[in-house]
Amino acid sequence: MISTAKQAADIIAEAAKNNADESHNAVLKVLAQLESSEPPLTALAEIAEVVRPSVDYVVFEYRASYADRALPFGEQEARRFGNAMGLLDHLEALYRRILDAANAAGPAAEAQRAQALQRCMACVVSRMIEHYRARQTVEASLWMRLQRHLRAATAEKLEGARVADPLDPRETVAPRGAYSQALLLSIAQAGAMTQRNLEATIALSAMFADLVDSTVLDDAAGAAKPEAPKPADGVGIKRTGRIRVVDAGGITHLVNTTKVDTAIAAVIQKLGAGQTPEQVGLARVGKADLASLLPRLRRIWCGAGEIREAQRVIIEKPATVAVGFAGIATFTHPEALQPPQEFEVWDYHKGAHNQGKSDVVIEKDRELPPEQWRVIDHSAAGMRARRHDAGARLRRNQLLSVAFLDAQKDPAFTLGEFRWLQQHADAQGGISAGVRFLSTRARVALIRIHGLRRGEYQSVGPAFLYPDTEREHLVLPYGWYAAKRDADLWLAGQIVPINLTDLKSRGADYEIVAYEQRES
């Protein structure tokens, strides 16, 4: 039986240092003994604050097994992911118990109620983040749980109450800040947040969360659900400035990020003047490439418009999937890989009988045949599908094209990337995958770059173009991008001289870059 924080600390201290499994078991032992005891409210809150750092440690240690994996989960990875999510769920249950005890204690326990509410919401946000690290998705049930906590905080008029920050005792946080962080992460996810800057984005979303002004409008269908917060919930919002409509967890929010825009602009200006990340209060993300990340997040978070979850249609139908640059180009537009005469160069080692021109060699990765998959469901943003037969080895963030067998013939095609992979051990076997669509209007081109490799005059290979909201982007094989690099595109029967200007994102085998046309 546990009745004091010291007893809980002694049990946790018995676990071997640097052993996440033993720490996990020690935390479960503390929580199990708490279930059969009735410590007073103050002692219960102290025990929770002793347990919380151990939960954070275990989740951090387990994370290396399941975050950003290139292969499907094995038995050990699945166990550790389940243990991490389970611990966060148990910790939230402990804080809910504290909240119930504080409610029973009356007005004298308002500080404990505010802290318990904030910690409950922080646990849910942590589960969202871990789920995204492992699956690149967030369960709708977590959003609904977070909304219930916010509704409780609003009803008690505690949504803005300041409590000690668990990560930095010198700072304070509010229950609404946890909800605002989840909204910022949802906007960033819709803005194609990449694994490369995920950790920095998570840290920055926590730092700027208090500057977000948001209100609940209604559910995505336009009619309030019984379990959803009522419109506005008594919270006002300035409807001028940087406004986004965010649909997350089936609820539509009006989000004002004007203060975030001002704060990020000030930080960018200070960093440009030579100040360090520590001097501008960004010590937690000092190792990130803030020069490129902050302007991008400012554009994603503070731009006008709507961020809506794509409605998913549950429908089973066949689809053909191709992977690899050569496989995608051959499957979607094989004639595009015919080398044009305009790319031929003079070879002095050749005789006059063939005019001294050397053959253009198209650089290709291993050309893999298209595979037959079965679509489980899909939306405008992506799809889930399953392959029952053996096929190519797949990786997370690998490029692919998909053609639905009932689709009309079109020169443009759908380009995407694998976001998660799961091996099946049942009788059917095979592998399931989550796919995020990069574009449904992609096109094939050839690209020529001079001096890409030592000893080679030119490198020619397939590339893909697709329109974005701002400009057309170019998808190149991994390693072909360099800032201000000159290149030539062979597109629609003519050479287009271009200059590579900016790296937008990078996957396992591709790079998405911005470019501009240059004078030939």
Image: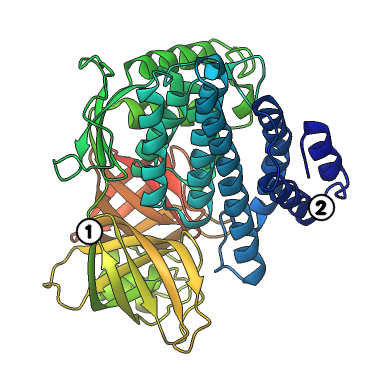
Q: Is residue 384 above or below residue 428?
A: above
Three-letter code for the amino acid on which mark 2 is drawn = Asn
* Foreground: disc 1 or disc 2: 2
Residue found 78% across the figure and 32% down from its top: 5
How far from the left and from the top, in percent, is residue 201?
50, 34
Give the mark, 1 or 2, whose residue is nearer the N terminus: 2
In the rendered view, does 289 fall on the left or right side of 458? right
Residue 474 % position (x, y): 33, 50
Q: Secondary structure at mark 1?
A: strand
Picture layout, residue 24 above or below residue 430 = above
Percent from the top left, x then y, of residue 231? 21, 29
Q: Residue at x 38, y 13 (%)?
A: 262
- Label 1: how many Cα within 10 Å (few below 14, some 14–19, many 20+): some
Q: Is residue 153 visible?
A: yes
What residue is shown with label 2? 19
The residue that label 1 is drawn on is: 440
Q: What is the tally of numbered marks visible in this picture?
A: 2
* Quarter assignment of residue 279: top right
